[in-house]
Image (cartoon, grey):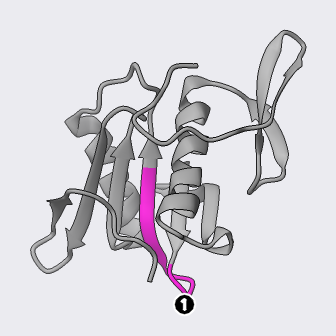
Amino acid sequence: MINLNLPNYKFKLKSSENKTLIFDNLRKKYFVLTPEEWVRQHFVQYLIDEKKYPVSLIALEKQLTINNRKKRTDILVFDADGNPDIIVECKAPQIQITQATFDQIARYNLKLKANYLIVTNGLTHFYCKMDFEKETYIFLKEIPAYN
């Protein structure tokens, strides 16, 4: 896997049936190591190690229903009261982040009402704070650390 624009972390990897698997510490099991999973695992560690978000407030692949269709958030971080605070959409490094990516996470947020949106392909990261009054988002240089 390629180096990302995130700190390097040590992950448990293993091979099974000619596939490389990565251990997910939150879900406590191995997953196929796809480029998107590589980004997700790095970004989760970034939130935990660098930004000090408690593991107990982070959910991966959280299901939600939008227009009778089941969708999944890549990473969802809750606040101390259990309300959605941050939605992270991860893409593989070779995937360009486009307006469609922002539209996808914005649709999720119509339902979740999180305060922050993050879109990353591991190389480029976009951090946004929601302005619910104006129904828009404000781009930030980085996501705030956990309080």
User: Left of 29 or right of it: where is 37?
Assistant: left
Residue farthest right in this picture: 17
Quarter of the view holding residue 23: top right
Quadrant in which the N terminus is drawn? top right
Q: Secondary structure at mark 1?
A: loop
Q: Relative to the observer, which residue lies in front, 110 or 76?
A: 76
Number of numbered callouts drawn? 1
Quick check: 6 above or below 64?
above
Quarter of the view holding residue 41: top right
Residue 62 highlighted magenta (yes or no): no
Quadrant in which the C terminus is drawn? bottom left
User: Left of 11 or right of it: where is 34?
Assistant: left
Residue at figure coordinates x 40%, y 19% from the top left: 94
Picture coordinates of residue 3 (x, y %)?
49, 25
Residue at figure coordinates x 66%, y 68% from the top left: 55
Picture coordinates of residue 20 (x, y %)?
77, 20
Residue farthest left in this picture: 134
Question: Which residue lies under the disc numbered 1?
Answer: 81
Count neighbours of disc 1 (C-alpha within 10 A) and say few if under 14, some if 14 to 19, many if 20 or more. few
Q: Relative to the observer, which residue lies in front, 44 or 32?
A: 44
- Which residues fall within the magenta stretch? 79-88
Q: Is residue 15 among the parts visible in the rendering?
A: yes
Residue farthest top in this picture: 18
Residue at figure coordinates x 63%, y 62% from the top left: 59
Residue 86 highlighted magenta (yes or no): yes
Picture coordinates of residue 36 (x, y %)?
54, 31
Disc 1 residue type? Answer: Asp
Picture coordinates of residue 102 (x, y %)?
27, 46
Q: Is residue 69 among the parts visible in the rendering?
A: no
Quick check: 87 above or below 101?
below
Residue at figure coordinates x 68%, y 73% from the top left: 56
Quick check: 119 above or below 142?
above
